[in-house]
Image (cartoon, rainbow, N blue to C red):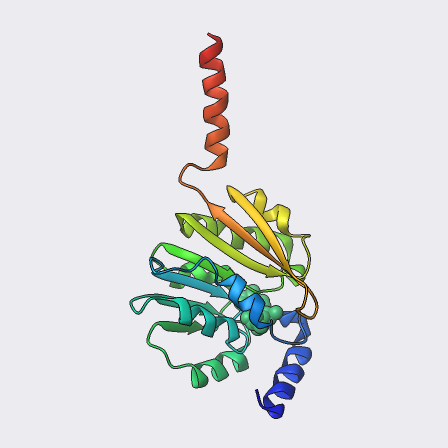
Amino acid sequence: MSKSNFFKTLINFTKNLKTTGAVYKTNKKVERDLCSKIDESTKVVVEFGTGYGNVTLEILKKLPDNGKLYSFEVNEEFVKTVKQNIQDPRLVVINDTAQNFDKYVKEKVDCFISTIPFTLIPKEICIEIIQKSYAALRADRYFCKAQYSKLHFKKFTAIFDYCSSSSVLDNLPPVYIYYCKKTKIPNRLKGKKKKRLLVLTKK
Ligand SMILES: C[S@@+](CC[C@H](N)C(=O)[O-])C[C@H]1O[C@@H](n2cnc3c(N)ncnc32)[C@H](O)[C@@H]1O
């Protein structure tokens, strides 16, 4: 990356700190880890927080030729830059909040990838985004989220069926990646089934 691009990113991320929640884009390891659940069977990916499109490019690298990527970004200037710099027929960049993704994405989703700062977004909106994403996700697929702390992990474990996390310590600041899976039989039902089974076996 050229020196001028480095400073442009640094200045624009810092200037918009209230919505970016970061001073610079995430590093290569975070990009790769976030995209680790995309494979040749992935058809539709939804990204929350395009920024300057670094994770977007990694998604496109892994996405099959017939795939589709919807990327949501609230900052109009970032959207303009990405539309100019990344011309890929599989990519649709949308200048709107993640909360509204279901107005645009009508098909089932194979993977959600999010770098939006939950710490700066009201709790009820975070929960709405997670719930809507869970509903739109295909079974056996993942919502992958980069976050600077594990404070929001519980919001995901309350809705998703299986969640794990890893950390990338050489990002500045270090980042946690949440991997949240929707399973074929939701955990809530598994619990109910278990209870019913216990009642049945007691009888
Ligand atoms: C930490 S930056 C990450 C940018 C880039 N994906 C990366 O990994 O470097 C978060 C981005 O999310 C955008 N953002 C914040 N809140 C959002 C929301 N509710 N919906 C969509 N984008 C949002 C910000 O404008 C910013 O570009």
Q: Up-down: is 169 above or below 191?
A: below
Count of marks placed on residues: 0
Q: Quadrant of residue 166?
A: bottom right
Q: Up-down: is 197 above or below 89?
A: above
Residue depicted at x 44% and y 68%:
59
Name the residue furthest top: 203
Q: Up-down: is 177 above or below 186?
A: below
Residue depicted at x 42% and y 58%:
102
- 97 or 199, which is in the foreground? 199
| Quadrant of image for the N terminus | bottom right
Q: Quadrant of residue 42?
A: bottom left
Q: Position of residue 131 (x, y in %)?
A: 50, 49
- 100 or 20, which is in the foreground? 20
Name the residue furthest left: 66
Q: Position of residue 167 (x, y in %)?
A: 64, 58
Residue depicted at x 57% and y 51%:
127
Q: Name the side, left or right, on which 149 lies relative to 160.
A: right
User: Where ligand 1 lies, by quadrant?
Assistant: bottom right
Q: Position of residue 28 (x, y in %)?
A: 56, 72
Q: Position of residue 85 (x, y in %)?
A: 45, 85
